[in-house]
Image (cartoon, rainbow, N blue to C red):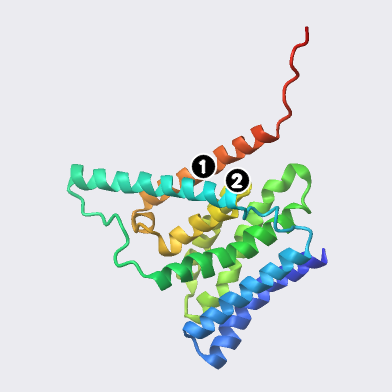
């Protein structure tokens, strides 16, 4: 229980300290943002190491990476193909590929933000909460972490002046996003796949994910379906062999 409390304090205190102490004193810039990102990632890594969650359990193996890349590539291929068909058949002018592509924004959003945040929320908090729920209610871990994910963004929204409907809308979008991310993780146990889903909303390789809501939902649906298939394959591998007939 003490590790869960420590992790919840990390989620609650670190964002406020980042926005209302670090940025107020040292300013908001590449250096301070990087320091905050690396600090949060390091603290999550320390807690994962110190708790019974453990690194093997959270889904960061090379096999997990391979599976995530295959499913992610399929999801991008589906929406890009759909966008291309829409451009040809209806005369739409949808942008299929991100242009220009920046290496630093990619690293910032995929590694430091998406991976860093999901290391804490999926890799740490999800398991700490799930392990303390009754067996028939483990599904509650996803909405609980989704709410925590949204609340962790509250200090940033307050610091930049969001209020009223805009604030509620942002928090609601955070909750909805992590409900999808959490579903992907609960099905697959693959942290890399959650990172791909998360990063696609921050710095997607195709702007169709965020600029075209319907295609964005298709993209996430493919990831969820891929997570379900990975879950089924894993269950089949773990299933005991059927007894063979003897003569």
For this view, does 124 lie left or right of residue 116? right
Residue sitting nearer the eye, 159 or 192:
192
Residue 52: where, in percent of width, then height? 79, 58
The kind of secondary structure element at disc 1 is helix
Are discs 1 and 2 less than 8 Å apart at CB?
A: yes
Whichever of labels 1 and 2 marks the residue nearer the N terminus, that label is: 2
Q: CA distance from mark 1 to mark 2?
A: 8 Å
Residue 184: where, in percent of width, then height? 56, 48
Which quadrant would the C terminus be assigned to in this image? top right
Residue at x 37% of width, y 44% of height: 78
Residue sitting nearer the eye, 83 or 129:
83
Residue 122: where, in percent of width, then height? 63, 58
Residue sitting farthest toward the left: 91
Residue at x 77% of width, y 68% of height: 5
Which quadrant would the N terminus be assigned to in this image? bottom right
Check disc 1 and report the residue beneath it.
Answer: 226
For this view, does 43 lie left or right of residue 216? right
Check disc 2 and report the residue beneath it.
Answer: 188
For this view, does 15 lie left or right of residue 138? left
**In the depicted structure, whether residue 47 falls above or below residue 29:** above
Residue sitting nearer the eye, 104 or 147:
104
Residue at x 70% of width, y 54% of height: 56
The kind of secondary structure element at disc 2 is helix
């Amino acid at each position: 229980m003490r590790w869960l409390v420590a992790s919840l304090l990390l989620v609650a205190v670190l964002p406020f300290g980042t926005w209302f102490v670090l940025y107020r004193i040292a300013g908001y810039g590449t250096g301070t943002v990087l320091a905050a990102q690396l600090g949060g990632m390091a603290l999550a890594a320390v807690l994962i190491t110190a708790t019974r969650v453990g690194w093997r359990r959270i889904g960061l193996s090379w096999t997990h990476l391979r599976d995530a890349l295959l499913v992610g590539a399929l999801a991008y291929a589906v929406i890009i193909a759909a966008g291309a068909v829409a451009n040809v058949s209806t005369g739409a002018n949808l942008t299929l590929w991100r242009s220009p592509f920046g290496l630093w924004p990619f690293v910032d959003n995929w590694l430091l933000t998406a991976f860093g945040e999901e290391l804490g929320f999926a890799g740490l908090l999800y398991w700490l909460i799930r392990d303390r729920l009754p067996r028939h209610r483990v599904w509650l871990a996803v909405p609980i972490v989704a709410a925590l994910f949204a609340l962790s963004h509250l200090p940033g929204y307050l610091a930049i002046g969001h209020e009223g409907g805009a604030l509620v809308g942002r928090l609601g979008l955070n909750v909805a996003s992590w409900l999808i991310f959490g579903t992907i993780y609960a099905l697959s146990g693959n942290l890399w796949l959650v990172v791909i889903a998360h990063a696609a909303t921050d710095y997607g390789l195709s702007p169709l994910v965020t600029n075209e809501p319907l295609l964005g939902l298709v993209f996430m649906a493919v990831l969820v379906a891929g997570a379900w298939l990975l879950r089924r394959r894993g269950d089949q591998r773990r299933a005991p062999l059927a007894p063979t007939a003897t003569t």
